[in-house]
Image (cartoon, grey):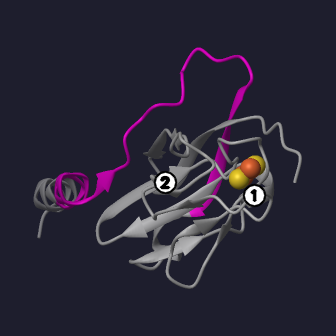
Amino acid sequence: MNRRTVLKVLGSTAAMFTANTKWGAEVTPDTDEKATTLDAGPLDAFEQDKVYEQFRDQGVLLIRRGEEVFALSPICTHRGCKVRAQDDNSFLCKCHKSRFDVDGKVMNGPAVTDLLRLKVKLSADRHVLVRVLKPKTTG
Ligand code: FES
């Protein structure tokens, strides 16, 4: 295999990765001065169909579902406590018992607004980068 063939194979692998990996909806404003970028580490460190909350204190719940990777803010939309992942992959806010599904949609109030989706992208070295709003929490 010559150099040109190797580059062609690498190029098609990268294109396949991009085509097969879905990234969550991007709603974190790019222009928000209070936002920072969290490097969550290599994509390969995240198994499919799991919720990762090791970045909860940094304002990120990371979810990998099949080929889809997306992130939610852990800040409850009721009064700002932090939610926690449950065994069924829903998120519970212990302050007033609001519950959200794995997509961040309200299942039970008092919250009436879904969890905020954060912008997620893959860096050139295959790290998951999440645009994070600085948390303002009470719990
Ligand atoms: Fe979460 Fe009230 S702050 S339910």
Using the image, determine if residue 115 lies above or below residue 6: above
- In depth, the one of 65 and 96 nearer the eye is 96
- Which stretch appears magenta? 13-41
**What residue does disc 2 label?**
104
Q: Residue furthest bottom?
A: 87
Residue 41: quadrant of the picture: bottom right
Give the quadrant of the C terminus. bottom right
Q: Position of residue 58 (x, y in %)?
A: 77, 51
Dot label at residue 61: none
Q: Secondary structure at mark 1?
A: loop
Residue 35 part of the magenta-drawn span: yes
Q: Is mark 1 within 8 Å of ligand 1?
A: yes
Dot label at residue 96: 1
Using the image, determine if residue 76 lies above or below residue 83: above
Q: Disc 2 and disc 1: Cα gap in Å? A: 16 Å
Crowdedness of circle 1 by 10 Å Cα count: few (<14), some, many (20+)?
some
Q: Residue furthest front?
A: 110
